[in-house]
Image: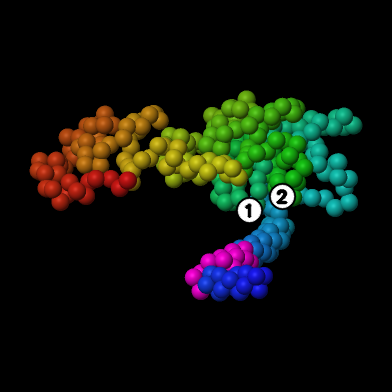
Amino acid sequence: MPIAIDKDRSKRNSKSLQSGQGIVPLEILMMGWMCFLTVAFVTLVVFAVDLAAGSKALYLYEVDGEPKDPVLEYLVKEGKPRFEQNHPIFLWRQETTSYRPPPRVIEFYAPWCPHCQHFVSKYVKMAKEIHAVHPNIEFHAISCVAHHDICKDQGIRSFPTVKVLKEDSYDFNEIKLGEVDAEHILRELGLSNDSVGKTKKNDSKHNNLHEKARDVPFRLRDGRDVRSDQGIQSIPSVKVLKEDSYDFNEIKLGEVDAEHILRELGLSNDSVGKTKKNDSKHNNLHEKARDVPFR
């Protein structure tokens, strides 16, 4: 009887191999796991190589020994005690010195962050603009890759982060990235901004949505973008804002023409060329089909 049972079992196994059941799914599962582990290993190797290459770029404001004046890059100083390096005098009060710090503006950034890379030119331009009128104001930049402990102590959670400190003070005031301009910085420092060249009203308020997107600091866990923030449900979507206002009014796609836009903005449309009535109302069914937004 035992021999007969073994024969039946071998027959069942041979049938299961032919029918794609039994041991075959186990082999496929093992092959899948091997492929997954191989891909994961290659990904980790590539990530390690990129990280090693990226670690060489520690700074944005002093590259190859060339500083971007008047911004002062805080550099690692060889041979200096670690505690002293992590507590620069413009950030922490030193009891052993009579140093009275001037007004300061400090940017905390990560060199790999695209927002920070874009912000460099804006920060340098603003620093030059203010420095021309108030040369006593210091502009600092701290790389959170080179000085991780400083940024950790300062509670930096997004890049870039800008803080200002008034003269002879170590109390910080963090500035929203969209409000970083010469006028706002001087106001936060309690200084006159009459002589500082101001940008146009529309530029200073960042009405341009593309620029507003760049003024959102980079957060590792922040997956929001302009589309989700503005509640965009269909593409394309057109919104209008009146002067000195951030209240949106969404326009139906079939009503997007010069006459309607000006009316929504509360402006005169007498001199604007109007299309024919039939065209403006899109009576043509083919044209009306094109005016249905993509969802």
Residue 20 is a magenta residue: yes
Query: Is 269 on the left or on the right of 65, as rendered?
Result: left
Quadrant (top left, top right, bottom left, bottom right) of the N terminus: bottom right
Q: Residue at x 33, y 37 (%)?
A: 239
Would you name the residue on which mark 1 appears? 112
Whether residues under marks 1 and 2 lie with C-beta atoms below 8 angstroms apart, the answer is yes
Q: Residue at x 60, y 33 (%)?
A: 175
Q: Position of residue 187 (x, y in %)?
A: 58, 27
Q: Residue lying furthest front in this view?
A: 1
Highlighted magenta segment, given as a residue range = 18-34
Would you name the residue on which mark 2 appears? 145
Q: Secondary structure at mark 1?
A: loop
**Amino acid type at image mark 2:** Val
Q: Residue at x 62, y 63 (%)?
A: 33
- Magenta residues: mostly which secondary structure? helix
Between marks 1 and 2, how big is the CA–CA gap?
9 Å
Q: Is residue 184 above or below residue 159?
A: above
Of residues 257 and 284, the one drawn nearer to the viewer in this rendering: 284
**Residue 50 visible within the image:** no
